[in-house]
Image (cartoon, rainbow, N blue to C red):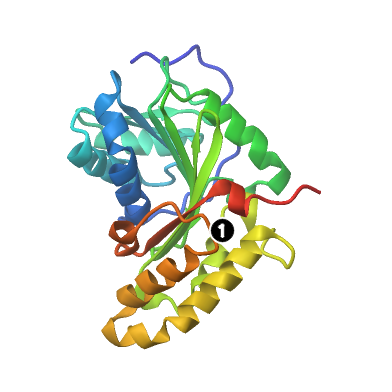
Amino acid sequence: MAPRTPSRPVGTVTRGTTNPNRLRRMDRWIAATHGAALRRSPDPVAVDLGYGAAPWTAVELLLRLRAAAPRTRVVGVEIEPARVAAAKPYEREGLTFRHGGFEVPLSGSPALIRAANVLRQYDEDQVAAVWERLRARLAPGGLLVEGTCDEIGRRHVWVALGPEGPRSVTFAARLGSLERPSDLAERLPKALIHRNVPGEPVHAFLRDFDRAWAAAAPYASYGARQRWIRAARDLRGDWPVLDGASRWRQGELTVRWEALAPLTG
């Protein structure tokens, strides 16, 4: 695949922090929810945007997506040229690395763009424009996943967007490390993290999730997973939870974006 005509990459250099398996929870969710679309795609290209100082996340994304969609190819895109040069030795069949930014320098339209821990350094009022730019690069039926996790991948929150706009927010955690669901607030994506205040929907959601978690305390004797599942079932009565027990068992819960979207102003 030939790149577009070279131009100045759009965006700024990130800290580049990365660790093996840091994005495993996000990858697992993408493979489960978007694998069928990748299998149907005539050109299943996935972009690991802003993979950081080491190429581990792109290498792992290829392995995990190919388990669900064997024809998938991954392109790691980084705005820092030295990081691209350092990643080149890891190229293999189905995996390449390219210099670029939010313009996504591919000749075609990818079926998936994953942008993990990229927008944390940006201002909240910049997020919508970045989302719009990245969504415009998606193939029909494509998916953009943008979110944040901690350094070793125990806690994630991400937004899934289609070409038409944001669809859902997923909360995911290693449940044994979680005291309460609102501990995930520190990993909210930039579009939501400053909205975790009284009066905003995401604050109300995390408050209700904590209450459901507390009410499910008797299930803790069966393990944190069973407690999470029970809390999720209770939460579904008041919030538009989109997934079910098969995902909850993975320590995930996905909610419709419109329910958590920031209020205007």
Determine whether the residue tagged by mark 1 lies in a helix, strand or loop: loop
- The quarter of the displayed image where residue 125 is located: top right
Q: Nearer the viewer, residue 208 or 77?
A: 208
Question: How many residues crowd around disc 1 within 10 Å: few (fewer than 14), some, or many (20 or more)?
Answer: many
Quarter in which the N terminus is drawn? top left
Residue 242 place in picture, x, y as percent: 43, 51
Taking the image as shown, residue 226 lies to the left or right of residue 194, namely: left
Query: How many numbered marks appear?
Result: 1
Residue 231 visible in the picture:
yes
Residue lying at 66% horizontally and 33% vertically, measured from the top left? 129
> Which of the two residues, 151 or 259, is positioned nearer the viewer here?
259
Q: Residue at position x 33%, y 43% from top?
A: 33
Residue 30 horizontal side relative to residue 212, left or right: left
Which image quadrant is residue 225 in?
Answer: bottom left
Please give left or right for residue 124 compared with residue 164 in the image: right
Tell me if residue 254 comes above or below residue 79 in the rendering: below
Task: Name the spot of residue 117 as percent of width and height, x first.
Answer: 50, 50
Residue plotted at (32% across, 54% down): 24
202 over 36 or under it: above or below: below
Q: Circle 1 is placed at which residue position?
A: 188
Query: Which amino acid, by three-letter code, is at mark 1?
Result: Leu
In the rendered image of this protein, does residue 221 appear above or below residue 227? below
Residue at 31 percent across and 31 percent down: it is 37
Relative to 23, does residue 85 appear above or below in the rendering?
Answer: above
- Residue 246 position, x and y percent, is 28, 58
Residue 190 appears in the rendering: no
